[in-house]
């Protein structure tokens, strides 16, 4: 007995030495001049560095600089905050005062030649506190700030004393380089810590501040060179004229004429990963029966993730419940609707996880063939994110929390408000060639104004007939009220910058857009209406519905499917100032799929540039202003700069005929 144990132990030692030896040879044979795939990961899971407020204050700084970042044998130079991928997590509390000094150590030149709405300024930056209920005016969350090379800026945030406790994040938002910088790794989590007094003992047992060891932050970021989607870091480097010395084209592979950059971009090499806290497929160890909270943040700026835990050895599985979305607690813990939680770019989900049976599990993202029914065409990532090893002694009697803290009053339930409670309505219309409301972004072009402390009802509609867009609004979360039939036009582009709207009967619309060029021939495709009917699909539930939010959810990012029409409501609680609305596919936003709206004082004018070339959002054969209760003045003929609050259908305007 003793002998056999020792001989098998000796055998296993020999095997380990052998494995170590071969893996050393293997590791040695992989290098930048002799690359191999797949990239190897598997380090132990670790959380990002934590920076924690105390006594109601957090004073910190973030240094933006170029730093070497390594995955397996591959070293790349990235612009990062404080040399770290991901950036440190900021842990704050409602009511805190946060002073953040952003120091931009990047230098000139800054590729400033490109026009607005083109990728540009790789060395200009700023910070956005994504999802916080906060003022959008400097020195707070002002995303129009330009912090150029060698400049710095001191943000001073007054965190709302009712700020919902949950999972948020920060990332650069300079228009033109936000895609490049986020793709490169500039992103960190913000956790607004829970109040143990407001939560059940079971939830406290898996949450910071009392039990942070069970509260696991997972920042999911893209590490991609493959050119099969829009995610290639090196292609972005070329687009933004990154300094040559930061590229990977000075190394040739295996003495051939292929550069390392060419090799990495070759889609057959599949250099396309989603890292967890900067690690490739790290291993997380949990005990059987233990409950953990996972805070999952999709900080990749591009792909949707459909995350689930898969058992890799036998059929037994873990219990996983969703408890919060985009930083807001749900009413109660719930099962994963389609067996997966979908995270569009910038979305967050908080999970409770309990695995009673020892074994090896994987956190994966998997999209299924039916998913396009609710998502249309959308960049989607399939792959393993993390290995979960469940071993060790069983934890007995640890309960899954069954109740959750309530949401703050600024995010109350607006499903049952009456017509007279709704102050005004607006339509956010996603349009082709990276435009929104039929135009490219201009900071000073205010497309809508709403008064503070009112209830708004907006329709998020998408004229694109195959692609979907995750739409994000700053300052306030939107509550999902309904998925409606889509009766608006569809937009078709010519592959370049020209595009045309068609009515659903296939005839070109009477009402087009600012840059419409009737001399360009654009024909209507035969499959233009394939994606109609999200209202019915959403209410039927089941497979193919992963892209839909559930009615009543509070979100700061909502996917608007092709030919989708979603009613959302929100309160313009407290904060006046500009509010940008944009697609969170970060390169779409940088290229113009963004608009400025504004929350103004009570009694202030709400005049804004709602129309594009005289056409209201959703107009096609008719040009109807948004239905605005509470004011029955008739529309004027100079519609471009005025807001109509009319119950009547306006007279048709007869300019701008195609
Ligand atoms: C960033 O680095 C600076 C300089 O080392 C340090 O003072 C600061 O605390 C760091 N910030 C964070 C958020 O970790
Ligand atoms: C950006 O800043 C870095 C220094 O961090 C500098 O080397 C580079 O030339 C600058 N410009 C560009 C376009 O990369
Ligand atoms: C993801 O994998 C599933 C099968 O597991 C496959 O059906 C689907 O096409 C894949 N999707 C993508 C985007 O690669
Ligand atoms: C659990 O698995 C991990 C990873 O394989 C290993 O490092 C650890 O020693 C194991 N723990 C126990 C108690 O078996
Ligand atoms: C969107 O739905 C609303 C509510 O049903 C409807 O009033 C509006 O006309 C729809 N818009 C479009 C473009 O289909
Ligand atoms: C489509 O509808 C518009 C508005 O009703 C009408 O003017 C046009 O003739 C119709 N086209 C076809 C092909 O039916």
Image (cartoon, rainbow, N blue to C red):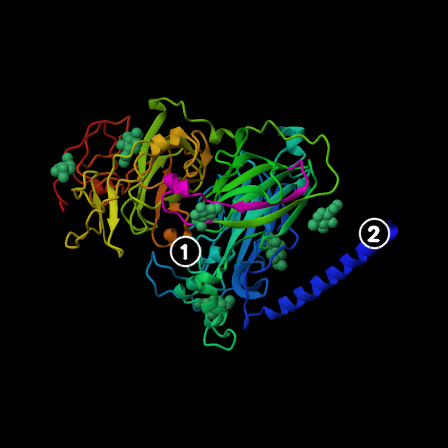
Badge 2 or badge 1: first in the primary sequence: 2
From the top left corner, tell me how far across and down residue 627 is, in percent. Answer: 26, 30
Residue at image position (84%, 52%) is 4
Q: Is mark 1 within 8 Å of ligand 3?
A: no
Residue 48 forms part of the magenta stretch: no
* Residue behind label 2 places its C-beta within 8 angstroms of ligand 4: no
The percent coordinates of residue 214 (x first, y second) are 66, 40
Q: Which residue is mark 1?
A: 229
Is residue 652 in view? no
Q: Residue at x 32, y 60 (%)?
A: 115
Percent from the top left, x then y, of residue 185?
A: 52, 56
Number of numbered markers: 2
Asked whether, in this view, residue 471 is left or right of residue 13, the answer is left
**In the rendered image, which residue does mark 2 sit on?**
5
Q: Residue at x 54, y 41 (%)?
A: 308
Number of residues whose C-alpha sits closer than 10 Å to that of mark 2, classed few (under 14), some (14–19) or many (20 or more): few
Q: Secondary structure at mark 1?
A: loop
370 magenta-colored? yes
The mark lying in front, picked from 2 and 1, is 2
Residue 622: x %, y % from top left? 18, 36
Residue 617 drawn above or below residue 418: below
- Say which of 190 and 183 sits in front: 183
Check disc 2 and report its element: helix, strand or loop: helix
User: Residue 410 — which label?
Assistant: none
Magenta range is 355-381
In front here: 350 or 319?
319
- On screen, residue 216 versus residue 558, left or right, reads right
Q: Does any portion of residue 285 appear in the rendered image? A: yes
Left or right: residue 438 compared with residue 75: left
Give the Cα distance between marks 2 and 1. Answer: 53 Å
Against 189, residue 185 (above or below) is: below
């Amino acid at each position: 007995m003793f002998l056999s144990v020792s001989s098998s132990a000796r055998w296993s030692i020999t095997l380990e030495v052998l494995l170590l030896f071969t893996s050393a040879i293997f590791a040695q044979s992989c290098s930048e001049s002799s690359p191999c795939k797949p990239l190897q990961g598997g380090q132990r899971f670790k959380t990002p560095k934590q920076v924690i407020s105390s006594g109601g204050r957090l004073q910190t700084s973030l240094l933006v600089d170029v730093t070497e970042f390594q995955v397996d044998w591959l070293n790349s130079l990235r612009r990062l905050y404080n040399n770290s991928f991901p950036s440190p997590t900021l842990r704050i509390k409602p009511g805190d005062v946060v002073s953040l000094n952003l120091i931009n150590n990047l230098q000139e030149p800054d590729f400033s030649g490109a026009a607005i709405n083109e990728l540009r300024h790789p060395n200009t930056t700023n910070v956005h506190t994504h999802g916080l209920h906060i003022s959008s005016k400097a020195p707070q969350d002002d995303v129009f700030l330009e912090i150029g090379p060698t400049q710095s800026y001191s943000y001073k945030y007054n965190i709302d004393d009712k700020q919902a406790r949950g999972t948020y994040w920060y990332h650069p938002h300079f228009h033109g380089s936000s895609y490049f910088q986020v793709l490169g790794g500039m992103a960190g989590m913000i956790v607004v810590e829970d109040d143990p007094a407001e939560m059940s003992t079971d939830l406290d047992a898996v949450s910071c501040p009392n039990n942070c060891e069970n509260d696991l932050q997972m920042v999911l970021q893209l590490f991609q060179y493959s050119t099969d989607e829009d995610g290639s870091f090196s292609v972005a480097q070329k687009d933004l004229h990154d300094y040559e010395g930061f590229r990977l084209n000075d190394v040739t592979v295996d003495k051939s004429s292929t550069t390392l950059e060419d090799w990495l971009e070759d889609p057959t090499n599949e250099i396309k990963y989603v890292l967890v806290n900067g690690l490739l497929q790290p291993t997380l160890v949990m005990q059987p029966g233990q409950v953990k909270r996972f805070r999952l943040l999709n900080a990749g700026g591009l792909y949707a993730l459909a995350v689930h835990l898969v058992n890799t050895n036998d059929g037994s599985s873990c219990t996983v419940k969703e408890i919060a979305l985009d930083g807001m607690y749900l009413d109660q813990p719930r099962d994963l609707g389609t067996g997966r939680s979908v995270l569009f770019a910038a979305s967050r989900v908080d999970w409770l996880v309990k695995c009673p049976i020892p074994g090896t599990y994987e956190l994966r993202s998997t999209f299924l063939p039916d998913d396009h029914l609710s998502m249309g065409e959308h960049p989607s990532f399939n792959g393993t994110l993390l290995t979960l090893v469940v071993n060790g002694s069983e934890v007995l009697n640890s309960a899954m929390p069954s109740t959750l803290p309530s949401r703050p009053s600024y995010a109350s339930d607006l499903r049952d408000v009456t017509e007279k409670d709704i102050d005004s309505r607006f339509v956010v219309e996603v349009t082709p060639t990276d435009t929104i409301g039929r135009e490219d972004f201009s900071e000073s072009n205010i497309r809508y104004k709403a008064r503070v402390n009112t209830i708004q009802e907006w329709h998020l509609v998408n004229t694109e007939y195959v692609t979907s867009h995750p739409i994000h609004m700053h300052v306030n979360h939107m509550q999902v009220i309904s998925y409606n039939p889509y009766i608006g036009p569809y937009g078709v582009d010519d592959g370049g910058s020209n595009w045309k709207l068609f009515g659903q009967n296939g005839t070109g619309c009477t009402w087009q857009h600012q840059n419409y060029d009737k001399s360009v021939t654009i024909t209507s495709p035969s499959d233009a209406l394939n994606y109609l009917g999200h209202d019915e699909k959403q209410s039927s539930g089941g497979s193919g519905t992963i892209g839909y939010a559930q009615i009543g959810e509070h979100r700061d990012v909502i996917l608007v499917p092709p030919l989708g029409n979603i009613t959302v409501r929100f309160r313009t609680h407290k904060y006046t100032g500009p509010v940008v609305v944009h697609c969170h596919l970060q390169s779409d936003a940088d290229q113009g799929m963004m608009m400025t709206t504004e929350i103004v004082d009570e009694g202030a004018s709400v005049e804004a540039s709602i129309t594009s070339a005289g056409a209201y959002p959703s107009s096609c054969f008719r040009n109807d202003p948004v239905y605005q209760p509470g004011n029955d003045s008739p529309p004027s003929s100079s519609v471009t700069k005025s807001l109509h609050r009319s119950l009547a259908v306006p007279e048709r305007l007869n300019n701008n005929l195609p």
